[in-house]
Image (spheres, helix red, strand yellow):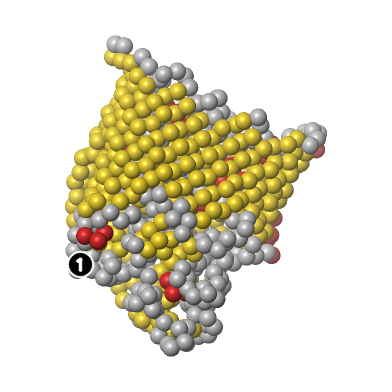
Amino acid sequence: MRRLLTVVSPLALLVAAPALAGEADGAASAPAYLEGVEVQGEIVRTAAGKTEAAVIDTPQAISVVSSAQFLERGAQNLQETLRYMAGVSAEAYGNDGRNDDSFVRGVEAPIYLDGLRQTFGYYTPRTDIHMLEQVEVLKGPAGSLYGAGVLGGLINQTSKRPEFMRSGEISLSYGTFDRVEGTLDFTGPLNEAGTLAGRIVAVMRDSGTQTDHVDDDRILIAPSLTWKPTEATTLTLIGRYQKDKAGTISTFVPWAASIFAEPGRRLPTSRFLSEPDFEKYDTRTVTLSLLGEHKLSEAVTLRTNSRWLDSDLNYQSMYPDGYSNPAQPFIDPERRVLNRYIYANYPETRTFTTDNHVQARFATGALKHDLLVGGDYQHYRQRSEGFSALTTPIDAYNPVYGNYSVLPRTPNPTERQSQVGAYLQDTMSYGPVSVLLGVRRDRAKIDGEVYKATTYRAAVMADLSETVKPYVSYSESFQPVTGTTFAGEAFKPTEGKQWEVGVKWQVTPDSLVTLAAYDITEKNRLTNDPANPFFSVQTGEAKLKGVEAEAQVRVRGFDVTGALTIAETKISESNTPAEIGQQLDSAPERQASVFVARTFPLTDEVSLRLGGGVRYVGASYSGDLRTPGFTLGDAYAAVGYREWLFSVNATNLTDKRYYSTCLARGDCFLGVRRAVVATIRRQF
């Protein structure tokens, strides 16, 4: 706590100085925090399609959540921001602490930041949500624009950028598991000419987790600078230094001690089966991004986005052997003691990504064109060393720590991945009908293996009125897959095709309802290797079908977000006959959610905002193993007074113990326990 205040207090004084001067002149601010949260109407735009467009004008299912919305709903990391979206399994592997695993339409989704790919392998730094303006989920294949990418969809994070109007905010939070967090966000002009603006976002967190001996600490400093010499040109430089001290929250609990445990023998969710002085998942991340835009004319715009990332990770852990004999993992007659694996990896990751394109709007007779031509390049390299072996066992019901030994490190093969692609897309409009055609050519290289692919996209959207727009689309995907099988054979790329039909209805200017149905065929999909639990195989083909409904509306002062997903995910071809017809791993076929909030003015300077939500996630399967579904509730309450906001968030209100998924290989992943966080914010 003292460290937190030592850092936050001086920064707060720097931010507060101009604001307090304004108060001295008699300026008073309204409780702007509680004016309501904008929803996905025409005012909400997304760059997930590489051009800024209103959600209603995009012939594809897109979900957007703003920072105001996900903070109101109690999100503490990226995957938690996605909880109230249709077609998204937000916490596919529960409360992990190492990365953000989310599925879109039954498939693990790659993560992007400002339109540039962020996830290339497992060891990817997590982005702090206080850096983000909004999070977008582009559903379905996006190969014609992004090249290599999982066909279910992608997650794009949009960074906060400097603004030319001075504003700022500091906050201090305290919550469950002794979570103490301080944040600062300040932006404004830096010169009298109004051509230079800056922003700084800072976070310091000292926190425990639901698992004993595992921390979730963070230091983040993210400065940014925008130079706008003319109305036509904007250049933004965003830096980030982030240092995390964390560990493995999910302890890979064997079936016999979790979902199939006898009465009284289910391990508590806080049980730690590693070693307190060995367990760590500590990262140091430095990134530098350059985002540029120049308008050659009213019709032609050039854009360039680039990012360089440098990350080091110290990953050490131990976990029980629930895989050798999933039905009976214990090694003693009393069924208490489990064998353990010791594992360590120390990867050094370097990535460079860039995307450059030109957008031109013109007409050929009565036909209007919105043409996008561009190319991108990305390079990923990871060097690492580590070790893995069986180590000393542990009594899972009365653990005694300290009896283990560390192995010498050995080098791992260096992983390299690069991709270069060129794309062309034209949206042609004639009267109320628009037709989108897109094509992309890629050359990807992974660990010496070269893959080439051409992917296509086509869509038709009709403007039946200014508020109702049906569409039909076709899209493809192409994804090189890193790694090898147990036999050392390189994986083939996954390939996918999707048909989607939908309609978007803008009920009011600040409300949007979307209904979409899709049919996806995926080939060469990775699944767990049942004979070798730490390796994967490609099962051949999968069929994914579903219907999604999503609404963000404002009704009589209530902000309502609702989502419904009905899906079917089946393995249709496999070398293992028993797999055919099985549901894809960790892909629930039924999900529903609703979150409602409203602001109640109490006086001219005081407002109360109340909100609450319910999330239902249906049962999922891994082979023949069924993980039961679960229903969770969330709540929010806040009082705004002038520039101050006092709020309380509560997620998983009833503190339900559940498993997000259990895998046929022999382990289960714990769900997120109840978290209650109280926050004080001061706006300038």
Residue at 30 percent across and 73 percent down: it is 411
The spot of residue 225 in percent (x, y) is 52, 42
Q: Is residue 7 above or below residue 152?
A: below
The spot of residue 77 in percent (x, y) is 52, 54
Residue at 44 percent across and 55 percent down: it is 619
Q: Is residue 38 left or right of residue 642?
A: left
> Toward the viewer: 558 or 162?
558
Q: Is residue 81 above or below residue 665?
A: above
Q: Is residue 445 left or right of residue 52?
A: left
Residue at 20 percent across and 67 percent down: it is 488
Q: Secondary structure at mark 1?
A: loop
Q: Is residue 533 above or below residue 42?
A: below
Residue at 55 percent across and 63 percent down: it is 657
The spot of residue 57 in percent (x, y) is 42, 27
Whether residue 479 is visible to the viewer of this picture, yes or no, is no
> Toward the viewer: 1 or 11?
1
Which image quarter: residue 339? bottom left
Of the 4 image quadrants, the one containing the N terminus is bottom right
Q: Is residue 474 left or right of residue 322?
A: left
Total tally of numbered discs in the picture? 1
Q: Amino acid at mark 1?
A: Gly
> Toward the viewer: 4 or 520?
520
Residue indicated by mark 1: 488
